[in-house]
């Protein structure tokens, strides 16, 4: 075991992070211990479990990271910092939104950061599974997929690799209650990543527009899924998926509307929220979760 301590700029509310992570039953969250065990995916198809524990406060955030060993330690540390977005201070974001109509929810959920999905491939798979499903069944379906075809280490679940996913048959996923098309989409994505036709590592260096253009060429990936990947797969700061039902409902409630907002109204509402639209999206979701 190797342990490191990290201090970052506040505000950063890790308890709210754990609260949101705990919505997904696949995540190994311990609220009392203020910790989460993160599945770290190794290039050889194996994995390591890395524990991240909060030992500080919202205003003075501090963490203990426990690694299994010191192999590639800097790379692993860098990935953990990226997942939890420790390099992006929230002070300027918070001050920006205090001058907007989102002030109430930014005050209520102050210090809530964007946190990335633990693996880029898993992030897109999860988004495809979640398409057009209510949140509870979406998590249930994802849980079935991972616990059936993924693997577990030290109580932490790892998603199936692209190669494993590519080898599945539609009938395998239909048995888990996947729709025909959703099964085809997930397997098709696995095939493209496994074959190298879709290189997620290289794609991550492209612009938002280029990534959306590339991903939406793939069957089963529309703008909503591509934007979700940019936000929760890569942590891009200025994404506002207007087609998202949760965002529509949150704005309806926040602005006391008797109906869901139109696309034109969503664009008008969100105009003052640039260049931090991703944070507006996150806090709107938090306001109704």
Image: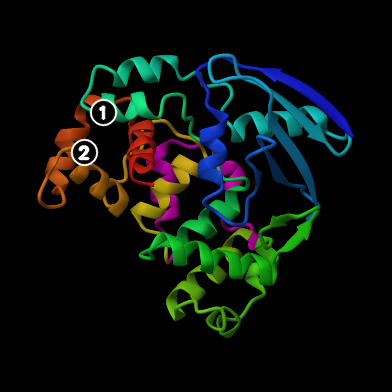
Question: Are the residues tagged 1 and 2 within 8 Å (C-beta)?
Answer: yes
Q: Which image quarter holds the N terminus?
A: top right
Q: Position of residue 85 (x, y in %)?
A: 56, 29
Instruction: Say if the magenta span includes residue 199.
Output: yes
Using a 10 Å C-alpha cutoff, classify the residue at mark 1 as few (fewer than 14 neighbours), some (14 to 19) or many (20 or more).
many
Q: What's the mark number on residue 271?
A: none
Q: Quadrant of residue 74?
A: top right
- Residue 187 placement, left or right of 255: right
Is 117 inside the magenta-drawn segment?
no
Query: Mark 2 — residue?
Result: 254
Give the spatial CA distance, label 1 vs label 2: 8 Å
Instruction: Let me know if residue 256 appears in the view.
Output: yes
Q: Which residue is mark 1?
A: 102
Where residue 160 appears, as percent x and y from the top left, is 68, 63
Q: Which residues are magenta?
A: 194-219
Q: Residues within 10 Å of mark 2 (few under 14, many from 20)?
A: some
């Amino acid at each position: 075991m190797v342990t490191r301590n990290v201090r970052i700029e506040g505000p950063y509310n890790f308890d709210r992070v754990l609260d949101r992570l705990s919505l997904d039953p696949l995540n190994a969250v311990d609220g009392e211990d203020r910790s989460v065990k993160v599945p770290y995916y190794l290039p050889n198809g194996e994995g390591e479990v890395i524990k991240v524990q909060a030992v500080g406060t919202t205003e003075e955030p501090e963490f203990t990271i426990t690694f299994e060993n010191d192999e590639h330690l800097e790379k692993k540390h860098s990935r953990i910092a990226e997942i939890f977005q420790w390099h992006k201070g929230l002070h300027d974001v918070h001050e920006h939104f205090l001058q907007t109509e989102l002030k109430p929810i930014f005050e209520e959920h102050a210090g809530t950061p964007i946190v990335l999905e633990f693996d880029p491939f898993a992030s897109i798979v999860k988004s495809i599974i979640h398409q057009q499903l209510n949140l509870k069944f979406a998590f249930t379906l994802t849980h079935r997929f991972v616990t059936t075809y993924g693997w577990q280490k030290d109580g932490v679940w790892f998603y199936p690799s692209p190669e494993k996913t590519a080898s599945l048959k539609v009938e395998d996923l239909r048995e888990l209650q996947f729709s025909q098309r959703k099964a085809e989409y997930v397997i098709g994505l696995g095939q493209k990543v496994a074959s190298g036709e879709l290189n997620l590592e290289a794609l991550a260096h492209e612009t938002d527009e280029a990534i959306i253009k590339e991903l939406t060429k793939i069957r089963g990936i529309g703008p909503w899924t591509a934007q979700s990947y940019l936000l929760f797969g890569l942590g891009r700061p200025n994404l506002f998926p207007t087609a998202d039902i949760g965002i529509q409902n949150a704005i309806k409630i926040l602005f006391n509307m008797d109906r869901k907002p139109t696309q034109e109204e969503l664009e008008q509402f969100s105009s003052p929220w640039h260049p931090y639209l991703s944070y507006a999206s996150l806090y709107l979701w938090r306001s109704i979760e």
